[in-house]
Image (spheres, helix red, strand yellow):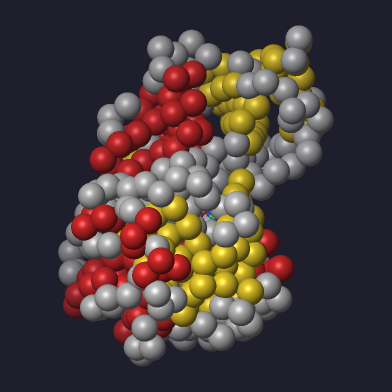
Amino acid sequence: MSQSPSTAATRPDDAGAPGMVIIGGGLTAATAAETLRKEGYHGAVTIVADEPEIPYQRPPLSKGFLAGKEGEDALLPLPAEWYPENNVTVLTGTAATAIDPAAHTVTLADGTTLPYAKALIATGAAPRRIPFPGVELDGVHTFRTKADSLAMKELFTGGGKNVVMIGSGWIGMEIAATATELGNTVALVGLENVPLSVAVGAELGTVFADRHKEAGVRFELPASAAEIQGTDGHVTSVLTTTGVTLPADIVIVAVGVVPNIGLGQDAGLTINNGIEVDASLRTSAPDVFAAGDVANAMHPVTGTHARSEHWANAIASGKVAARSMLGKDAVLDDIPYFYTDQFDLGMEYSGFGALTKDAQVVVRGDLATREFIAFWVLEGRVVAGMNVNIWDVQDAIKSLIASGRTVDTAQLADPKTPLEEI
Ligand SMILES: Cc1cc2nc3c(=O)[nH]c(=O)nc-3n(C[C@H](O)[C@H](O)[C@H](O)COP(=O)(O)OP(=O)(O)OC[C@H]3O[C@@H](n4cnc5c(N)ncnc54)[C@H](O)[C@@H]3O)c2cc1C
C-alpha cells in the first residue's frame, strides 16, 4: 500500500480519534475532501483510492487529454501538493474491501482496518461488460481510466487504424470524434436508430450524428456486435447483428457503466440502482454516506431517486456529502447539468432528463447552423434545456427550469426575446 502524497503521521489510526474516511479516488472524493477542509473540519481525512493516481477527473480522458491537447494538469481537480498541505492522506493503489457500519471501520486490501467517525462511499462506476463472443481478444478495450486514455492515445496517435466503437452514447461519440480527428477510420455500432437519442431525442441526436458523418464516421445503427472476430488472438473485425463486417484494429466497448455498489451491498446498505441515499446523501446505515456516480439520490424537486453519471454531480454531491458528514444542513437539489465536446460541437445540458420523455421540444435558433438552444417543455414549463455552440446561457436556462413558471413557447423559440424576460 502506498501513501502518496501524504505521510503516515496524518493517518487517522495514528492520529487518535477516528476521522473522515472517503472511499474512492475520483472527483467526488476530491471535492468532498476539499469541502471538509473549507468547512473548517480539522480532524483526520483519509482518501482510499484503488487506482495508482491521486484523485483525477475523467472528462478530458475522451477529449483533450486523449487528443494530446491537454496535459496531466487538466485531470487534477486539486494539485498534488494540496493533499499534504491540507493534511489529507491519500492511500493510492489501495482498495477498500469492506465497511462495517456497526464497528465503524473500513477494511483495506492488505487487511488493515481504518476506524471512521463518518465514511463516504464515492466508488463511482465501472464500464458495463457484455460477454460478446471474442471480447477477450487483444485490441478489445473498455474506457474509463487515465490508463485507458493513455493506452488509446498511443494507439490512435499517428492515425491509420480501423476503430470500431460499440456503443452510441456520450463516451462512444466523444472517443469516435477524437479518434477521427487523430486520423483513424471509425465505425460506430449502437442500439439506437440515432446516436444519443435516448438522452436528447432523435432530432437533436441527428445534429451530432451528421457532424460525425461529415468527418467520415460510419454508423451501423441500430445494431449490436454479434461477434468480435480475430486472428492469432488479436481482433480483426466486428460482425454486427445486421450481418455487416467492420474491419477493426481496435474495438472499444462503451455500453454504459454500472455503479460500484459492492462495498455498500456487502455492508447491508439499501441498494437500488446504486447505493440509495436521501437528499442529504445519507445511506441506510448511520454515519455512512454515498455520493457521485455510485449514489442514487432522492431529488427534492422531482421527489424521485435519480443516479447521475456526470461531472457536475460529482462536484455538487461531493460538497453536499461533506457538509452532511459534518452534521450541517445540506441537500442535493441542484438542477442536473452535463456537457460534451465532439469535433466543433460544444454542448451544455441542464434539466431533468426523466421529465423530457413526453415533453415538447422547442428550438431557438437553427439546427442546421449547429448554433441553437433546445428546450423541453412539459405542461407549459421548461424541464430541460441544451445549448449547442451558444455560450453563457446556462444560468438563464437553469433559472427558467427552477422557476417552474409557465412559458410562451413562441417567445422561447424567438432569439430576440431575452431568456430572462420569458
Ligand atoms: C471518458 C469519460 C468522459 C467523461 N466525460 C464527461 C463529460 O464530458 N461531462 C460530464 O458531465 N461527465 C463526463 N463523464 C462522467 C464523469 O467523469 C463521472 O460522472 C465522474 O467521474 C464521477 O465521479 P466519481 O468520483 O463519482 O466516480 P469515479 O470518477 O468513477 O471515481 C471513483 C473512483 O473510486 C475508485 N474505487 C472504486 N471502488 C473502490 C474501492 N473499493 N476502494 C478504493 N477505490 C475504489 C475507482 O477506481 C475510481 O478511481 C465522463 C466519464 C468518462 C469515463
Residue 199 or 420: which is nearer the viewer?
199
104 left or right of 216?
Answer: right
Q: Quadrant of residue 133?
A: top right
Position of residue 381 measured from the top left corner of the image (x, y, whole percent): 41, 80
Q: Is residue 243 visible?
A: yes
136 left or right of 358?
Answer: right
- Taking the spot 37% from the left edge, 56% from the top edge, the residue there is 8
Position of residue 178 measured from the top left corner of the image (x, y, whole percent): 41, 29
Position of residue 177 measured from the top left corner of the image (x, y, whole percent): 43, 31
Position of residue 100 measured from the top left corner of the image (x, y, whole percent): 63, 74
- Taking the spot 45% from the left edge, 83% from the top edge, the residue there is 280
Q: Is residue 244 visible?
A: no
In the image, residue 47 sits, relative to residue 380, either above or below, namely above
- Taking the spot 57% from the left edge, 16% from the top edge, the residue there is 162
222 left or right of 309?
Answer: right
- Taking the spot 48% from the left edge, 71% from the top edge, the residue there is 120
Residue 85 or 113: which is nearer the viewer?
113
Residue 209 or 392: which is nearer the viewer?
392
Task: Count how many numbered circles sit on residues in the image.
Answer: 0
In the image, residue 143 sits, relative to residue 205, either above or below, namely above
The quarter of the picture where the C terminus appears is bottom left
